[in-house]
Image (cartoon, grey):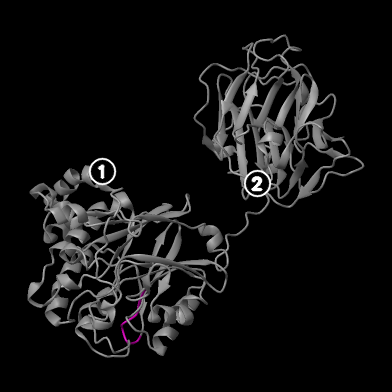
Amino acid sequence: MCTSHDQAVGETPQAGAARRGFLRATALLGATAAAMTALPTATARAETPIPRPDPRSRRFTLAVMPDTQYLFDGPSIDRAPVEASLRYLLEHGAQENIVFLSHLGDLTQNGAKDEFAAIGEAFRLLDRRGVGYSVLAGNHDVRSSTTDQRGATPYLDAFGPERFEGKPTFGGASPDGYNTFHRFTAGSRQWLVLALDWRLSPQGYAWAKDVMARHPKTPVILTTHELVVGDDSLSDYGQQLWDRLIEEHDQIFLALGGHYWPAARATRKNAAGHDVHLHLTNYQNRYFGGAAMIRLYRFDLDRNVIDVETISPWILGRAAKGLNELERQEMELSGDADRFSVEIDFERRFSGFAPVPTRPARPVARMLVPGTMAYWRFEKPVDGTDGTVRDLSGRGNDLSLVTVGGGALGWSADHHPDQPGHGSLEFRGGKPPLKGAYLRTVDGAPLNRATFGDGYTIEAFYRLPADWDPGRNAWSGLVSRTGTGGAAGKTADDPDEPLATLSLSNDREPQWATRPLNQQGIATNWGQETPLETWWHLAVVNDGRHTTLYVEGCPVLRNPRASAVGITSVGLPWLLGGYEYGGTIDQIFHGRLGDVRIVARALPVTSFMNQ
């Protein structure tokens, strides 16, 4: 930055930043300082291979370095802060799964040959280790009045396409050499970084569009020097980039720029109606020209979030020598513009250009593992006349429809993405006065008498709607065994409770409550709260001694260690979507129920229906 028209934006440093990250940074000081002082020389490190990023991990980090111009300004060149940041990335690459570094331009103050020679030498730390990175020209790196058609410059001599040839992440460059694209693999998919010049020419725009057209299913992170000018505000050139490139290309979900200060963020809806996150990161106005601060974008594809942190490895590494007052303030920034999280449902966000293929339905025969006692799937509505759901295991544990108060059982093609059968039953019930429908095993079904002394696995898929109400719908049963503890001669706890029920609490916590053969009382396993309008898979597994409840294939915390053998029976039916109390139907499930399977042995997680 620092041209006269830029100064009007504001040169006042950020003040009053909250110190949310202070304790964390303080705790890291000793370890970081030791690591930094223990680093071998660049020559020695070149001989030591570093672990490559894990391309399958769903957690990975993109590092971003903004304007470093004041560190490379004529006679006052100081490579140390930049080299400290680059060494930090090398040192923490495996731990953080750092996949790439993007510099946002204004590498130098005057665009002079000796300035580029100095920062070019600093970046050889990454070159020697084969680490992927991108750079781009800012207005101080080239004549600011020119576009990417300007021809030869010291920038191009130092950071032209030839520097990146042969790197596994390098995808190519525009004919002028000022625009490049790079690819990395993370979370088992490819990602693309567009590194665009300070000012795109018509040829530059055409090149960028062509790159995306040749990679139509790849998410794109756009980097440039000038984009956001303040919170919720784009600069004039940033608006031009939006209008001519970003808005019409749904692949671009994140765009990063520097140039102005202080740090800021904006979010815009593109032509597809999707959010594009646009960030300004620049710290040249802060102590030591920003001290080569880096911003770490930590992607977590499972949590659907990018956690962002801003640190100065150079200052952190100086802690052992004692920090001055400004260094103590600057080693880690914790203001809202510097430390934040961005929530992105990646699968949904990318579905317009890279939809996840629907998992096909799996044949019934594949689900009939040894020991299968009953298997029900709902790929069509329950016939209103016959009202029977066949047990696909062939063991005769068919289900019959029971209606209450003139209610009905709906059907939907909606299903858990990993469910074998593509369909679900829609229960519309609640507490009395009852109206709805549920299913029960037919009289004489072998399942009614089974006690599972050698173990069992009960699985079910379910989804709760937005109007699920704890006051009316809590404690309804997904799968339950009728007959009371009292009828079985087990009177500890509440004798009117059913012999087994897989239910949902008022906080939507799955609960398996049963009377084992070897207990008088009720044994319970508890899961955590499961959000509405989301499909869930439950599995209750008993190995003949203990019972474990799994949610989405993950064991829950509240699994009792007490011995639990089998399930007590008085020969009465099982219910799907119904719950009895005192031998009388007391509640009907409200939500969708997918495939249900009962197996007379403990299954490993790898054999669950959602695998």
Q: Is residue 172 above or below residue 374?
A: below
Pick out the residue farthest to the right: 385
When asked about the image quadrant of residue 106, the answer is bottom left
Q: Residue at x 66, y 30 (%)?
A: 502
Q: Is residue 439 above or below residue 309?
A: above
Residue 56 percent location from the top left of the image: 42, 53
| SS class, disc 1 | helix
Residue 180 percent location from the top left of the image: 35, 77
Residue 592 percent location from the top left of the image: 71, 43
State the mark number for residue 350: none
Q: Which residue is mark 2?
A: 419
Left/right of residue 505 with respect to residue 165 in the rendered view = right
Residue 350 percent location from the top left of the image: 53, 64
Give the position of the C terminus as an image quadrant. Answer: top right
| Mark 2 vs mark 1, CA separation in Å | 45 Å
Q: Which residue is mark 1?
A: 23
Q: Look at the image and give the residue range highlighted in magenta.
A: 175-181
Q: Residue at x 31, y 83 (%)?
A: 177
Q: Residue at x 65, y 13 (%)?
A: 493
Q: Nearer the viewer, residue 272 or 134?
A: 272
